[in-house]
Amino acid sequence: MFKHILVPVDGSENAISALEKAVELQTLTGGKLTILTIYRHHSMLEASFSMVRPQDPGNMDDIMRGAAREVAETAKARALELGSADVRAFVKNGPVARNIVAFAAEHDVDLIVIGSRGMGSIENYLLGSVSHKVTGTAKCPVLVV
């Protein structure tokens, strides 16, 4: 039925619940599982905050990419613990919902399994959640957990 399942993860409890459901579905269908973590490019305002933290120097994008990579690898390890036989993890940068939908289209994803609420910013409360945007724009089925 589902040959390729995509699970966007951000480290939130809902994302981990979605991952657990995706592994369960993968086990039933025998398909492959892809984990996707997306981080947003920081603004100049955020960059200015990094200047006042001398104990944490470095490029904010590099720090955010590293944190996203850690989230993706932790999710991949959890999927393997749960019995996933075929799992890969990717990290991307940019608008979250748009990147999820684009990634799904580019990689022939049959199903997106996504948490109902993640660790989004205040912007998501004003403009709508990522899961809502994904369900409205994805070409494949979306399961919101």
Image (spheres, rainbow, N blue to C red):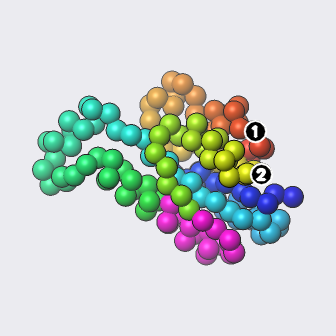
Quadrant of image for the N terminus: bottom right
Question: What separation in Å lies between label 1 and label 2 (alpha carbons)?
Answer: 9 Å
In the rendered image of this protein, does residue 80 appear above or below residue 21?
below
| Residue at the front extreme of this rendering | 106
For mark 1, does the 10 Å Cα neighbourhood hold few (<14), some (14 to 19), or many (20 or more) residues? some
For mark 2, does the 10 Å Cα neighbourhood hold few (<14), some (14 to 19), or many (20 or more) residues? some
Q: Position of residue 73 (x, y in %)?
A: 49, 66
Q: Where is residue 116 in the image (x, y as percent from the top left)?
A: 63, 43
Under circle 2, the secondary element is loop
Q: Position of residue 92 (x, y in %)?
A: 49, 49
Residue carrying label 2: 110
Residue 139, disc: 1
**Residue at x-position 64% and y-position 54%:** 7
State if disc 2 and disc 1 touch (CB < 8 Å). no
Left or right placement of residue 57 versus residue 116 in this view: left
Residue 111 in sight in this render: yes
Which picture quadrant has residue 105?
Answer: top right
| Residue at the top extreme of this rendering | 126
Magenta range is: 72-88
**Residue at x-position 62% and y-position 74%:** 80
Left or right placement of residue 72 versus residue 81 in this view: left
Of 130 and 57, which appears nearest the observer? Answer: 57
Which badge, 1 or 2, is on the more N-terminal residue?
Answer: 2
Hey, what amino acid is under mark 1? Lys
Residue 13 in sight in this render: no
Which picture quadrant has residue 48?
Answer: top left
| Residue at the right extreme of this rendering | 1
**Residue at x-position 68% and y-position 71%:** 86
Residue 31, disc: none
In the rendered image of this protein, does residue 139 appear above or below residue 54?
above
Q: Position of residue 126 (x, y in %)?
A: 51, 24
Hey, what amino acid is under mark 2? Asp
